[in-house]
Amino acid sequence: MARILRSLSVDGVTVTIAFVIMVAYFAIASPFFLSGENIRNLLVEATPIALIAAGLTYVLLAGGIDLSVGGVLGLSAGVAYWGLLQGLPVGVVVLLGITVGAVVGVVNGLVISGLGVNDFIVTLATMSMSFGLLAVLASSVTLAGAASEEFSEIARGAIFAVPTPVIIAVVLLALLEVILIKTPFGRRVYAGGMNPRAAELAGVPVRRVRFEVYVISGAVAGLAGVIQASRLNSVQDGLGSGYELTAIAAAVLGGVSLTGGRGSVWRTVVGALFLVSLSRGLQLLGVDPLWFTIVTGLSIIAAIAFDRIMQRVAASRATSRETPAAPMPPASVSEMTRV
Amino acid sequence: MNQSARQVSLPDRLSALIAKPSGGAVVLLIAICVVMPLTQPSFLTPDNWGNIINQMVYVLLLAIGMTVVLISGGIDLSVGSILAISAAVMADTINQGRPFIVALLLALLAGAVFGAVNGLLITKLGLPDFVATLATLGIGQGIMFLWTKGFPFIGYMLEDYYVLAGRDRLFGFIGAPVLIAAAVALVIAAVLRATRLGRHTYAVGSNRDAARLSGISVSRVKITAYVISGLLAGLTGVLLAGRTTTVSATMGIGYEIQAIAAAVIGGALLSGGRGRVSGAIAGALLLTVTYNVINIAGVSATWQQVFLGAILLLAVIVDRLGTLAYQRSLSRARVRSTATLA
Amino acid sequence: MAETSAAAGGAPLFEVRQIVKRYPGVAALTDVSVAIRRGQIHALLGENGAGKSTLIGVLSGITIPDSGEIRVDGEPVNIRRPKDAQALGVTTIHQELSLAPDLTVVENIFLGRETGKWGLINDRRMKEQVHQLCSEFGLDEDDMRRPVASLGALKQHVVEILKALVFDARLVILDEPTSGLADSEREALFEHMRALRSRGLSILWVTHRLDELYGLADAITVLRDGRHVATLDDPAAISPEDLVRLMVGGKASSPGAVAEEVGRTRWSGPQDEVLRLEGVSRLPVQNVSLTLKRGEILGVAGIAGAGRTELARLIFGADRREKGTIWINGMPAKIRSPRQAFKAGIALVPEERKTLGILGDFGVSKNISVSRLGGVALGGVLLDGGKESAVAAGYVRELGIKTPSVQQKIRNLSGGNQQKVIIARCLFTEPSILIIDEPTQGIDVGAKVEVYRLIYDFVDNGGAVIVISSELPELLRVADRVVVMREGQIAGEVDVHDNSGSDEDTRKTEEIMALAVRESVA
């Protein structure tokens, strides 16, 4: 029993096992589930979620939170589509969408790391502004009906039966994972989230890294918005709302710590696939898709509760083995200077 | 913070004013009230102010609950969902033909229970406050979508409801919701100021460990704060349902941002330990007046959400600058008190 | 077993007998017995790790002893939780105060025990109840209204003391209450302690500063390595030197003795100046000037709160200095962040390893490479795991770091090995100046020797080191020169180069102590 518990606490194992079990269950319950068509749809549907969750993972690893990803996705989709309607070339449209996301990321990063303002309130505010701007845009222009083959190809094309957005996502996600694991920048992201004070003294420019992850998160969400706009070939008021919840759920299911320093992109992606497969699987079984937000919310709670339990197991193992060098000081009391 | 002003220098006073809870909101409100009438004469009419007062009630009630939670060191993102669910409970119970009072009590109970669930998730399961309430926000919205299935609740506006809905106006312009909100504000202000519970709420938000060492049950205080927030959100739902006469699945979405904005503008600190009902009132008033100004100025209502986000962003930035100024003035005060001793 | 004389008559108010507390691998307390009488200021002395905190923990219900007995008024009692201790009238005032910063003085004093009916609070009555007491202890009307965060350290201490007084404490435990207080404030605090004594309260007082004891303590108990060394009923009869001897003893683990075992071949190259500070200031550091030469170990001494760590942070760029200039190798240096400091050839091994040093979830190799990732990256872009492991393995060998592998999470290593990893991290940046803040805090004897050897190796090969330490014997042995800080300033300098003999040690110790606390102890 203890051994099983231990192997479950290894990074990423739990969510992968859960994912495989679930897929197996749906495959038995509904033969259609593993059909090429369903898998293709599922992957395309998972693409924007996986992308924004991956960007969010950077922010979480660095010890922050970004609630604006859904709003950014919506706003970027809207602005990109508006650009398309203005007759801009597709390349420029894509860049436009990414830039809009990056700009929101810059605002987030400046206020959060520059001024030290509470991160989730700041991103809550920029989320509200993004959705608001999309509403303003959508109410003044009808964001639909652009007949651009090229733009549609972004989400609807396929190479060897693999949908283009999936290829884009796989390449980008792999890149994000490599940056995280294999570059000095990625290492600094982890270090800053793990213990900002120690990282700062070890020469990690913690504040700059924190700024940069918000820009990355914003830009990635912007790209996700462009893909979504291409997929729907229209953008409506409210596009992207609730995505932040799904993205956080994906990250948390993948075992990304909300306090920073623990997690990785591939685990978040598994979390995102888990959620999207769950929603599609339930639909195939005839469950009302409206259950989805409830399931998402519950899975966040369950995942964190599970994580807490695993940490307690790990901690109890550690203390039984570890030899404290000195007697434990009395429980320290939080600083008086905090106001 | 009415320290007797012995040897207080001007910069100290300035930073004290900025740092003063809700000081910024009051200054901004006065500025609006001075500038607006110059361009929009209709702004200062009794009718308009009657509207503002009647409109601000909903945000105010949520902001008061949010202030209590913020003081305790938490945050409640789920108030919008609680509001919607309570409204739906109210409408559904009435539509089932049960007495009005039963519906009202059930609706309030639903809010309180929802709040208790938040509190339990946070204190017993150890979820971070904002994640727990973000999750329950989503769950609540899901429940609303499932429950309504695209058909909003209607037809619950019995005559019993008219008073609560604010249709019968006293003195020609004040609706019952205003009086209810005023009563709630007084009660909560009294609880915060003069009861053990209130004192302990500040203590828990100010220094959890000190509170625990003093024998205060941190969990109980936090759960109570979330129950109060849930209860007030439920009450808001009841009042709002009377005003809108329909309860749709999307009811209440985005209200948490308004509530947080109002509370923070009112000087409640996100880090806990500070905040006041009077601040929440100032914050709610500022928000409502801003909407009103936008309206009168002829800006499309779709801009509201943009402004809301911008105001929240500004509020937290000012809050942060205020905190920094306050800390500086504190350390100056400490250096001075040391110096005078020497 | 030294016992207090029965001069006061009757059973002592609080008495611990034969207390034993073991942690895995460490005996924190062995057979410790102490008796505290009514109305007695009882000082508790001992070096770091002597067992003072554990004893306090036992009395305040935070630590449960493995065996032994606690008696109050001669009756055996059971203290298993902080609540039990409170019920017996024990109040512990820790260095980190347990006040709610946003609440006022009166609100804090009565926190959790507010008076009033039906859940209401009667603020006026509470205020009346403590008004007299507050003014006796120097808190005026204005202070009582303000949030305690805006009060100075002394007044915050007073609030804690009043909290104890109002609720009938019988024993007040003060854990280094004077650290962070100015001289005038310390005097005021001592007056308050006398006032408590005259009210019949007992005080168990932990302090590091011997000069404070005289004229105040009624009894002194000295602990060393978790054992009771002596209880002295007449503090006036013992000299500070004898007290130091009791505290340090001739024990093998004394850092001085340890350092002596490590041989040293001195740097024979040019002794050019590598670091110069002129008028460096940022509160609490004021106007500090000093120089450091190649091949030299400069010790920095001073009591807690003297600004030593803050000075190190200023040199290292972790805090921005407000005034003053820093020269490195004769060039004015613009260091505005630790990152720039590393680039300029300065490395810092911080104090409080757990919170400021280690990156707990990272393995040994990642902890070593983090300050110079460019050194393990291909073309400075892609991290080379093989190279990173090889670098780490090199240091593991060279510094004798005991770890199952270089991938092992640093959290799971012992304190001494963690410290060596942090030193390896610094060495990997190839610094010319190494600043080490409390190099041997919380690590075992064997590791201490190795840390000293690392320091020597570094300077003997042309580096320069600044060692900050609270343990004077350590500084006396390790450093060539010791500057003493007091209240943020350099109070003086003592040459400890080529020290020999314990007499000279004692003289230098006294010299440093005198500089650190102004009043001469001798």
Image (cartoon, grey):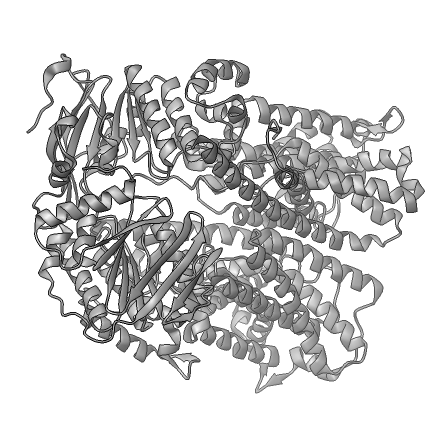
> With C228 as the anchor, is B98 left or right in this view?
right
Rendered image quadrant of residue A90: bottom right
> With C324 as the anchor, is B278 left or right in this view?
right
Give the quadrant of the N terminus of chain A: bottom left
Rendered image quadrant of residue C417: bottom left
Give the camera-side residue of A10 and C22: C22
Instruction: Return the x and y of residue C80 as percentages of the image width and height.
Output: 25, 29
Quick check: can you spot residue B298?
yes
Q: Residue lying farthest right?
A: B41
Q: Residue at x 81, y 27 (%)?
A: B163
Q: Residue at x 62, y 37 (%)?
A: B9
Is B279 located above or below residue A208 in the figure?
above
Q: Residue at x 60, y 77 (%)?
A: A165
Give the camera-side residue of B271 and B38: B38
> With A77 as the anchor, is B212 left or right in this view?
left
Give the camera-side residue of B28 and C433: C433
Is C328 located above or below residue A171 in the figure?
above
Is C219 located above or below residue A239 in the figure?
above
Instruction: Return the x and y of residue C45 as percentages of the image width and height.
Output: 19, 35
Instruction: Return the x and y of residue B287 as percentages of the image width and height.
Output: 75, 43
